[in-house]
Image (tube, rainbow, N blue to C red):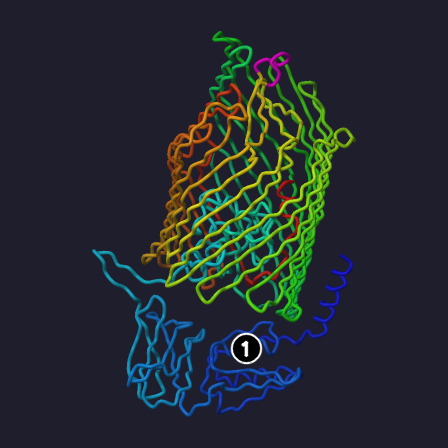
Amino acid sequence: MRKIHLLLYILLLGAVQVHAQRVSRDFRNVTMPTALQQLGGMTHRYTINFIYNDLEDFHVTASIKGATIPEAIRHLIGFYPISMTMVGDSIINVECSQKTVLRYKGRVVDDKGEPAEYANVVLLSPADSSFLAGGVSNESGYFVIPCNARRVIAKVTYVGYKSKLWTAASPDLGTIRLQADRYTLKGVTVQGHKLSYKPSPNGLSVMVKGSQLEQFGSAKEMIKHLPLVMGDGTVAGHGTPQIYINNKLVRDASELERLQTAEVLSAEIITRPGAEYASDVTSVIRLKTVRRQGEGWSGSLWGNFGKSKGMLATANASLNYRLRNGMDFFIRANAADSKGRITATSNDQLKATDTWDYHSRSKWRNDYKFIYGDVGWNWEINDRHSLGLTYSATGTVKGKRTITKTEQVWRNGEHFSDDDNQSVTKSKPNLANSVNTYYVGRLGKWGIDFSADYYGSHTDMDMAGGTDDSSVSSNTSTRSNLWAEKLTVSAPMPAGTFSFGEETSYTNRKADFTQSGFSADTHIRQRTAIWSLYANYALPIGKKLNFSASLRLQNEHNRYDVDGKKDDELSHDYHVLIPKLSMSYADDGWQHSLAFATYRYNPPYSIMSSSVNYRSKYEYDTGNPFLQPMTTYYLSWTTVWKWMTVEAYYTYIKNSFRTFQTAYDDVSHPGVIITDYRNTPKTQNYGVTLNTSPTLGIWHLNYTARLFFSDADLAPMGITHYWNGLCTQFRLDNTFTLPYNWTANITASLTPYNKSNVAITKTVASVDLRISKQWLKSKNIRLSLYANDIFHTNYKEMTAYGGINVRTQFKEYDSTQCVGIQFTYSFNTVRSRYKGIRAGSEEKNRL
C-alpha cells in the first residue's frame, strides 16, 4: 500500500506541475483564423501559428469553458480536415490537412431550420459515381470539404431524414434543408428516428440525449423505462443492477433524483459484467453524462409528495461551486418522511403433535424519518488526472414499526383461542458515516483507477409486544465497520485490451440481542477479510468477431465469535476462482453473443443472525449462521437486431438462500411457527426474455416479456410439495412526446397465475400513469403528476408450502395505489466531475 500511495503522489505532483492555463470564450459563426487569434491573445505560454488563407473558409460556433489552449483548439477543429501539431511545449501549428485549390462548403439544417449536427456529406464523380471526398457537419451544421473536382455529385445523409442528391457545379453549396423521412402505411404515419439503442460488447448501449428518455426529468425515473428494465428496477433475467454515474457507484437513490436527464448522454446496460465488479454483481447500469465545461455556482431543488394509505414526502437540495482550474466543491442534503401501511389476511396450518389452524388479519404501519447529506471536493486537473474526496452521512431520525394482528386459532379442529397481538419496534436515532476517496489517471498508455472507502454504523432497536395475557420485549444493538480499497490498472497490449487489479475489504460487525425470556440472548461478532485479484482481456478479430475472458481469484477469511469465543464450525475460509467468458459476432445490424459467467453471493449478515425475534404469539423468526455462500453458473445466448433483443438463458445454482418454516418448540411453545433461512442444494432456471423498443412518431414503445421455469431440488430439505410450471412476466411501457415539452407515460405490468417450486401465485397486475411538463429554454423547471396502481390490482396472493408440515395462505397489499407530484428546479447546471467508484461494494451490501 505504501508503494501505491507513493506512486499516486508522484503522479499527482507531476500533474500539478504541468497544469496549464484555462480559458473560457464563446464563438458564434466566426472564421477559424479569427477564433485562433482570439485564443492567442488570451495566453502568454503558447504561440499559435497558422496561415490565414489556409483556414478562412472554416467557420466555427463553440462554447469553450475552463479549457486549456490545446483543448480549446481541438474543440474548434471538430470534424474539419484540420490538423494541430505541438512543437515542444509552447508552439502550436494549425493547418488544413488537405491541400486543394477548391473547397466545397455549405450548411446542413433540418426541416425546422435547426443545425443538423454530424450529417454526412460525400462528393461523388459524375462519370461513375466513385467517391471523391467526404466530411461531417459540425454543431452549427457547417462543413468544408477540400476537393479539386470542378463538377461533383453531392450527397447528404442524416439519420431520420431523406437523403439529398444533386449535381453541383460550384463549390458553394449554400444551405441544404433536409426533410424528415416519413411514409404512410395503412393510415399510420411512421417517422424515422435515430436508433435509441444498440448492442455493446457486454449488453446494450442506449442513447438518452435526443431521445424520448430525455423527457423523464430525473435519472431515477428514466432508468425504469430503459430496455430490459422491469417495473421493480431489476434487469430482466439478471437481477438488481449496480448503478454508476460515470465512474462513481451510486449508494443513495436520491443521487439519481438529483441527476437530470438533460445531463445524461447515454446509458449502458451491462448484462455480462466483467471480473472488475464484485462476485455478486449480475448486472450493471452505467450512466454517462454530457461533457460540459463551466464554473461558478450551480444547484438544484427537488421535492416529491405522494399520498396513498400512507404518505411519502421527500425534499432535496444540492449546491456546487466550480473553479476555473477544474476544482469542484459540493454539498447536498436530503430529508424524507415515509408513512406506509401493509394490510394482509392469512390462513395458515401447522401439523406437529397437534394440528393447528390460524386465521388472522394484520396491519403493518411504518413511520420513518430519514436525513442524508454529503460534502466533498474533487479536482479534474486535466484530461489525464482527477481525484476527489467525499464524506456522507445517513441518519434515521425516527423509526417505528407497529404490527397489529387479530388471530383465531383452532387446535385439532376445536376452537382454541382468540388473540389480539401487537408489537412495536422503535429505532433509536442513529447516523451512518462513510468516506470515499479516489484517483483516476493515466501515465503514458497505462491507466490507474484507485478508490478507498470507510463505512461505519450503529443501530439500536427496542421491541415491545404481546397479547393481553402476556408481554415480551427485546433489544438489538448492531455496530458495523468496513474498510476497503480497490485498484484497477489498464495496460497497453499489441492486440486487444487488458486490465487487472485487486480489491480488499475488512468488515467488523458486532450484534447483541437480549430478550425477556421467549427465546435466548445472543452476542455475536463477525469479522470478514476478503482479498481478490482479477483480470480482463478482450480481443477483437476483424470487425465482426470479439472474444473476452475474465478471471477473479477471491480469498475470504471469516471469524465468528459467540459470547466472546471463536466458533470453529462457523469460521470458514474460502478460496474460489470466478471465471467469465463471452464471444460476440456482429454483422449487418445483427449481433449474436454466447456468454458463460460465474457469480458468488455471501449471505447478508441480517439473515445469518441466530437471534430469535418475536412477530406475534404464534410466529417467530430467526437467521442461520450455518448458511453457505451461493454460487450461480449462467449460460446465455443473446441476439440483438435494431430495436429487438432476445435472450435465452440457463442457470445452475448451488446453495441458494430461501426461507423455511417449521415448528419452533412443540413442548415449551406449542403451536408456534418459526421462519428461518436454509440453503437449497441445487436449483435450475431456464427461460427466454424478449424486449422490443421501436419509436413510431411521438410514440416510443418499450415492451418486455419473460417466460421461464424454476426447477429446485427441495426433497433433501423435507419439502414434499413441488411444481415446475411456466412463469411469465409482461411489461408494456408507452411514452408519448407531446408538443410544448409535455410528456405522457402509461405503463402496464402483468404477472399471470403460476405454480412454481413450493408456491401457487395468483395473477398480479398494475397500471401507472405519469404526465410531465418542462419549462424554460433550458428545461430547468419540471413538474410531474403521477398515479400508480390506478385500478388497485397490485395484490400479492399466494399459497405456499415452504417448510415441514406448514402451509401458508395469504393476501397482502402494500398500499402501492397512490397519487403524487414532483417538482425540480436546477440552475447553472454543470456536470459533477466526481469519479470515485467505491471499493468493498459487496461487503457494504451485506451490511
The quadrant of the rendering that contains the N terminus is bottom right
Quadrant of the image occupied by residue 481: top right
The quadrant of the rendering that contains the C terminus is top right
Q: Position of residue 431 (x, y in %)?
A: 69, 42
Q: Position of residue 304 (x, y in %)?
A: 51, 46
Q: Is residue 667 magenta?
A: yes
Q: Residue at x 73, y 37 (%)?
A: 559
- Rate crowding at label 1 as few (under 14), some (14 to 19) or many (20 or more) other CA atoms within 10 Å: some
Q: Position of residue 26 (x, y in %)?
A: 53, 76
Q: Is residue 809 magenta?
A: no
Q: Which residue is more in the foreground, 623 or 405?
A: 623
Q: Which residue is more in the foreground, 313 or 517?
A: 517
Q: Residue furthest left?
A: 186
In this view, 672 is above or below 609: above
Quadrant of the image occupied by residue 486: bottom right
- Is 290 left or right of 12, judged from the image as shown? left
- Is 748 left or right of 359, judged from the image as shown? left
Q: Residue furthest top?
A: 414
Q: Which residue is more in the foreground, 207 or 336?
A: 207
In this view, 447 is above or below 93: above
Q: Residue at x 38, y 47 (%)?
A: 690
> Bounds of the magenta span?
664-671
Q: Secondary structure at mark 1?
A: helix
Residue 774 appears in the figure: no
Q: Residue at x 44, y 25 (%)?
A: 799
Q: Position of residue 747 (x, y in %)?
A: 39, 45
Q: Amino acid at mark 1?
A: Arg
Q: Residue at x 42, y 56 (%)?
A: 592
Q: Main secondary structure of the magenta part?
A: strand
Instruction: Identify the residue position indicated by label 1 in the image.
Output: 74
Residue 664 appears in the figure: yes
